[in-house]
Amino acid sequence: MPSSFGLWFGAYAESLVDDMITLQGAYQVVNKNPLGSAAGYGSSFPTNRALTTKLLGFADLNYNVVYAQMGRGKAERITAMALANIADTLARLSMDACLYLNQNFDFVSFPAELTTGSSIMPHKKNPDVFELIRSHGNRIKALPNEIMLMTTNLPSGYHRDLQLLKEHLFPAFQTLKECLSMAQLMLSNISIKENILADEKYKYLFSVEEVNKLVLQGIPFRDAYKQVGTAIEAGTFTHTNQVHHVHEGSIGNLCNEQIRTMMQQTLVKFEFEKVHTAINALLKS
């Protein structure tokens, strides 16, 4: 089917929007103050938990002190799943880029300084950056299951098992940030081969377009399908490279601004400024 790189880029942009929505959901879960739950059953000190919540910039607090401890492991798992969603988008993007760069596709190219040569084949340009992003992304995708298994069958309260979660979760943040940075670097230097579909080998991509033209003339789809199929088998198939896709989200109507708006609306919900203001106020006091 005819496609475009505008459509391809836009698909990953919208995928990242949904990834941000799940990340924002994880942020809502962890943006609650557990301070005052002590070892899991509260404290005899008259702690003003509402005040500490405000001073620390949390959106709310974990009201039940037992749940504040039970939430450990759950918060990490939810956060890991949000990270895994982003990692999955990057890994799939990387797989596409690896395919499109190889000589069988030859859709894209990158500067020599962003690819590596083969150890024995002088003609090769290896997409090492994307291959590493793909692998790092797949490793992060395993993290939610790893955390889930580490917290399986734990009763309520705090358990020493939970301290092991940090050494698995915390490095994933930095790894994902580096993958995002490298993906941005690669995509900002991508070159797209022009007129790809002018190649004779891609002419049958337009078979559905020819079927649809007949349908729009009033021919039943079944008959149009058979007519075009017969022409292909007989070697008499003809087509034009012009497509007229106008519905939302198609080649001719990418809706990039709508996708951008969805991303902006999601990002503002994080309200990081409230946290930064609270922390700065504490540091100055």
Image (tube, rainbow, N blue to C red):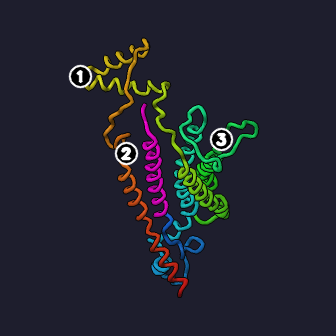
Q: Is residue 228 magenta?
A: no
- At label 1, counting other C-alpha atoms closer than 10 Å, the crowd grade (few under 14, some 14-19, many 20 or more) is few
Residue under label 3, please give it.
125
Label 3 vs 2, first from the N-terminus? 3
Q: Is residue 84 visible?
A: no
Residue receiving disc 2 = 254
Residue 9, horizontal then vertical, whole percent = 46, 46
Instruction: Classify mark 2: helix, strand or loop.
Output: loop
Identify the image quadrant of the N terminus.
top left
**Closer to us: 200 or 142:** 200
Task: In the rendered view, tell whether residue 202 sits above or below residue 34.
Answer: above
Q: Quadrant of residue 214?
A: top left
Mark 2 crowd level (few <14, some 14–19, many ≥20, 10 Å Cα): many
The mark found on residue 187 in the picture is none
Magenta span of residues: 1-28
Q: Nearer the viewer, mark 3 or mark 2?
A: 3
Which residue corresponds to the image point at 53% horizontal and 68% vertical from the top-left? 68
CA gap, disc 3 to disc 2? 31 Å
Above or below 192: residue 240? above
Given residues 152 and 270, the one toward you in this image is 270
What residue is disc 1 on?
A: 218
Residue at the top extreme of this rendering: 234
Magenta run includes residue 18: yes
